[in-house]
Amino acid sequence: MDEINTKIPQPTELIPAEEARALTASAKPGRSQAEADTLAANALRWAMHNAEGQTSTRIRTYAMYGRTSVMLKFAPGETDCAGAGNAFYNDLLANSNVLVADAISSIIHGRPQGLISPLQEMRLLNEYNAKLVAFLRRLRRAGYDVKAGEELAAEGVHDNSTVVVSWA
């Protein structure tokens, strides 16, 4: 095999064993930061995808039982680490490992970390912010009242990983 297939597989598509062997053969030892960078990008992408995907179902369920708002987690909690945390943190963990999930949590909360490269750290923050802002705008365009960040802090919600979506 002269060239490694770089096509991005669909979530249910399995990588052929031949391609996995070729990737292993071309791997360069001692690239743990590159591995963490790759895992971090994938984990953040899936955590954001899952958080967005679960929103519609949660709104429908809450509305069915007479509720008028739902609290969503679009970031790991301030204290999420060492393999334990909210649903967003658990999605990061499920698509990487404890060290990478903890590093992403630190990046999102502005804490120092040494596992993920500075360049990838900036990429992750850009992707995270862009996706979150776009999703919040999409919710507002759909007619929902959305509160996050300083708006919630003024109401006494101190967990900056929370987004409140209301429809009444």
Image: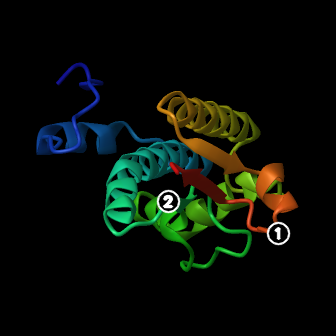
Q: Nearer the viewer, residue 165 or 149?
A: 165
The kind of secondary structure element at disc 2 is loop
Q: Nearer the viewer, residue 128 or 123?
A: 128
Q: CA distance from mark 1 to mark 2?
A: 19 Å
CB contact under 8 Å: marks 1 and 2:
no
Specify how the rendered protein is coloured: rainbow
The structure residue drawn at horizontal position 51% and vertical position 61%, both measured from the top left corner, is 70
Residue 67, given in percent of the width and then of the height, sits at: 45, 65
Seen as rendered, the residue at the extreme top is: 2
Q: Decide: few, some or many residues near mark 2? Use Cα within 10 Å; few <14, some 14-19, many ≥20.
A: few
Q: Is residue 62 left or right of residue 165?
A: left
Residue 26 shows in the view: yes
Inspect the image, locate mark 2, and give the three-letter code of the amino acid beneath it.
Answer: Thr
- Residue at position x 43%, y 45% in the image: 52
Residue on which disc 2 sits: 68
| Residue 37 falls in image quadrant | top right
Point out residue 28 in the picture as x, y percentages from the top left corner.
48, 42
The image shows residue 84 at horizontal and vertical percentages of: 55, 80
| Relative depth, front residue between 105 and 24 | 105
Q: Which residue is mark 1?
A: 156
In the rendered view, tell whether residue 47 sits above or below residue 130.
Answer: below
**Residue pushed farthest right?**
154
* Nearer mark to the viewer, of 1 and 2: 2
